[in-house]
Image (tube, rainbow, N blue to C red):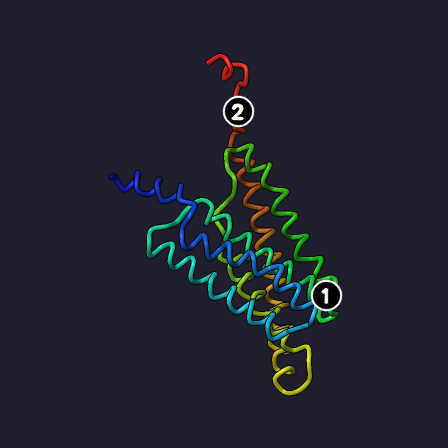
Amino acid sequence: MSPESATDAGQSLVWTIPNGLSALRLLGVPLFLWLVLGPEADLWALAVLVVSGFTDFLDGWLARRLGQTSVIGEILDPVADRLYILAVVVGLAMRDVIPWWIAISLPLRDLLMWGLVPLLRTRGYSSLPVHFLGKAATFNLLYAFPLLLLGDGEGTVATLAQVFGWAFALWGIGLYWWAGLLYAWQVRRLLASTERRPRPDRRAAGEV
């Protein structure tokens, strides 16, 4: 089998260990929300976030190690990250740990990104490569919100967690929007420099 064929075969994989870990991460989203908003079991909620962070690293490492990279894996991983960020900000806002402007600003940025997808498809693209700013923003936010949750208490540990949590949060929000605006600028340049992809002729396709 040629390297190209091996790559195509890997991209078509669905039932793999990395994809299973990504699915497990997704199942943790409603569990986290229930722990935070129901019994307010913050330590268990933090444990869910820790497990999610570990599986986030592990599924990417295993995908490369085992040669099990796939299209569905490339979709599941960022979707899981976005859902965890959304779940955490909603949960913390409902607990009055963070203000609602934070909980609203992050999904608004994601709406901006989703709104650009139809424009990309007119040029034959479904997405652009993830920028390092976006990765840095996600890293900051995934550390910030567990710390803010831990800081929702009393004592020295809670105070330190709150200080570091807000530091990560403010940097993360700034980088998150910066990455989004940079992505929008890249889309604008692509639209200006690339011809529109012609639509397939459905009547011709039906005659074949």
Relative vertical location of residue 204 with respect to residue 129 in this rendering, above or below: above
Figure quadrant of residue 38: bottom right
Q: Secondary structure at mark 1?
A: helix
- Label 2 residue SS: loop
Q: Nearer the viewer, mark 2 or mark 1?
A: 1
Q: Nearer the viewer, residue 53 or 108?
A: 53
**Residue neighbourhood size for the residue with mark 2, other residues' Cα within 10 Å, grouped as few (<14), some (14–19), many (≥20):** few
**The N terminus is located in which quarter?**
top left
Please name whichever residue, 21 or 6, is drawn nearer the observer in this view of the structure: 21
The circle on residue 93 is 1
User: Could you tell me residue 95's position as x and y percent?
Assistant: 73, 69
Q: Mark 1: give few (<14), some (14-19) or many (20+) Cα within 10 Å.
A: some
Q: Amino acid at mark 1?
A: Ala
Q: As shown in the figure, which amino acid type bears the numbered disc 2? A: Pro
**Residue drawn where x is 40% and y is 54% of the image:** 17
**Image mark for residue 185:** none
Instruction: Tell which residue pokes out farthest to the bottom in this image.
Output: 156
Residue that appears at 51% across and 15% down: 206
- Which residue is nearer to you in this view: 199 or 24? 24
Q: Which mark is residue 198?
A: 2
x, y (%) of residue 9? 34, 41
Q: Residue furthest top?
A: 207
The residue lying at 54 percent from left, 57 percent from top is 134
